Amino acid sequence: MDPIKVLVVDDHDVVRKGIITYLMTEEDIEIIGEASSGFDGADLARDLNPDVILMDLIMENGTGIDATEQIMKTNPDTKIIILTSYYDDEKVFPALEAGAFSYMLKTSSADEIASAIKKAAKGENVIEPKVAGAMMNRIRTPERMPHELLTERELEVLICIGNGLTNNEISEKLYIGIKTVKTHVSNILSKLDVQDRTQAAVYAHRNGLMKETK
Amino acid sequence: MDPIKVLVVDDHDVVRKGIITYLMTEEDIEIIGEASSGFDGADLARDLNPDVILMDLIMENGTGIDATEQIMKTNPDTKIIILTSYYDDEKVFPALEAGAFSYMLKTSSADEIASAIKKAAKGENVIEPKVAGAMMNRIRTPERMPHELLTERELEVLICIGNGLTNNEISEKLYIGIKTVKTHVSNILSKLDVQDRTQAAVYAHRNGLMKETK
DNA sequence: CATTTCCTCCGTCTCAAGGCTGAGTCATAA
DNA sequence: TTATGACTCAGCCTTGAGACGGAGGAAATG
């Protein structure tokens, strides 16, 4: 059986070298390339057509999410294993939705990672227990995030609130009357189930709604 | 000359193994131990008395900051090199204040890290250019962060505001009169140079003041 | 001892915030 | 056509927020 062709994408030089050094001792795994950014990783994946990709999420040029989406278009059969430090919801689910095959943490032992690569090549998913726990929570609570109930306009207003604007400033910014702003604010408060604009601002920050404008 | 005795502290198994694997090829560097948490790292440092410690900042049990402070008490001559992914102000300066000797990023090449270890053993600091830039900014702008002007009590109140509490709720939580809360809030608003509590809440979230209670 | 800082509390006053009710327009779907 | 939802705006009303000024006690500091 041919060795498994693996591509390693991580902007941390020591991590990349470390993984590669270790994996070189595995007989049925062959490192065919490495990249230090999401962009380079996507390019290399297209050119080299690896069986498995070890992908970091947070990188300086092109996140692992974007790279994963890109690679799934050009190499739909490639199994992408996310290998990162984070296991919070906001990171995990976008990655899995983008097409990631497995999700490992960097606290995993080198053996576990080698095992995950072999399983991925055979079509078996590997999800870290901590990550799996987060997934179960998501499944157990099918209630959608409250802010998904918001209309586009309400979301705009919520972003303004999250930036500390007053109703008056919002009305000027969005070219609408202050009464309209108040209506939106009221609807937002009831939909998010919070008591005042300050709590709404907190909600926006905690749920990552401010990232685009930060 | 004796080889440099190095201790590696990082909760990411692949990072630790990777660094060690690489550094083993360096003749004048000897890995005398490794730890996967800040607590273990501090214990090992006390027992083994290494010349240089490679220390991650974010770990599951005991942060690198705490471990660094601890180690500086027991092993004041040990040079601690912070090796992490982050180069924002909030991470860098506490580490240097705690007694870190050098500050490297994980994007550094393995050669640079080996070089930093040798320089640290000789008493030369190594600061990553990106981190150095942040330091220069701090020096160029001697204006301290506004929230450093806050008193302890005011900081408590600000945290409450950041959690979306009303003045009334704050007064109950802190066992003080509502008038007192209002006084604190007014002082906070003027010290932070913001107009209302919502902007204060935003400030608290953006400047990482909410991390303890999140 | 004198000064400063911090925490505490009071009264007054103004205004933004937000609840409640109602209503007109427009686009899309049934 | 009718119904529905989103966006818009209005009036009325209550209350919390915040500014301003004043003040006392405790503890650190010079």
Image: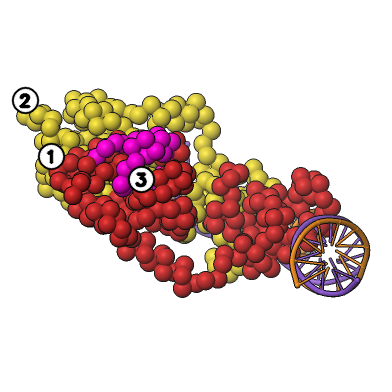
Chain colours: A red, B yellow, C orange, D purple
Residue at x 35%, y 56% (from the top left corner): A102
Q: Looking at the picture, tell me which residue is in the foreground, A39 or A12.
A: A39
- Could you say where residue A170 lies in the image, as x and y percent from the top left? 75, 49
Q: Confirm whether circles 2 and 1 share one chain.
A: yes
| Magenta span contains residue A34 | yes
Amino acid type, callout 1: Ile
Q: Nearer the viewer, mark 2 or mark 3?
A: 3
The residue wearing badge 1 is B31
Q: Are marks 1 and 3 in contact (CB under 8 Å)?
A: no
- Could you say where residue B201 lies in the image, as x and y percent from the top left? 60, 53
The residue wearing badge 3 is A55
- Could you say where residue B28 lies in the image, as x and y percent from the top left? 10, 29
As drawn, the residue found furthest toward the left would be B1
Badge 3 density bin: few <14, some 14–19, many ≥20, Cα 10 Å = many
Q: Quadrant of the C terminus of chain A?
A: top right
Amino acid type, callout 2: Met
| Magenta span contains residue B136 | no
Q: Is residue D23 left or right of residue B27?
A: right
Residue at x 31%, y 32% (from the top left corner): B108
Q: Looking at the picture, tell me which residue is in the foreground, A70 or B21.
A: A70
- Could you say where residue B137 lies in the image, as x and y percent from the top left? 48, 29
Badge 2 density bin: few <14, some 14–19, many ≥20, Cα 10 Å = few
Q: Nearer the viewer, mark 1 or mark 3?
A: 3
Residue at x 69%, y 68% (from the top left corner): A190
Which chain letter goes with mark 2? B
The residue wearing badge 2 is B1
Q: Which stretch did the figure color magenta?
A: A31-58
Q: Secondary structure at mark 2?
A: loop
Q: Secondary structure at mark 3?
A: strand
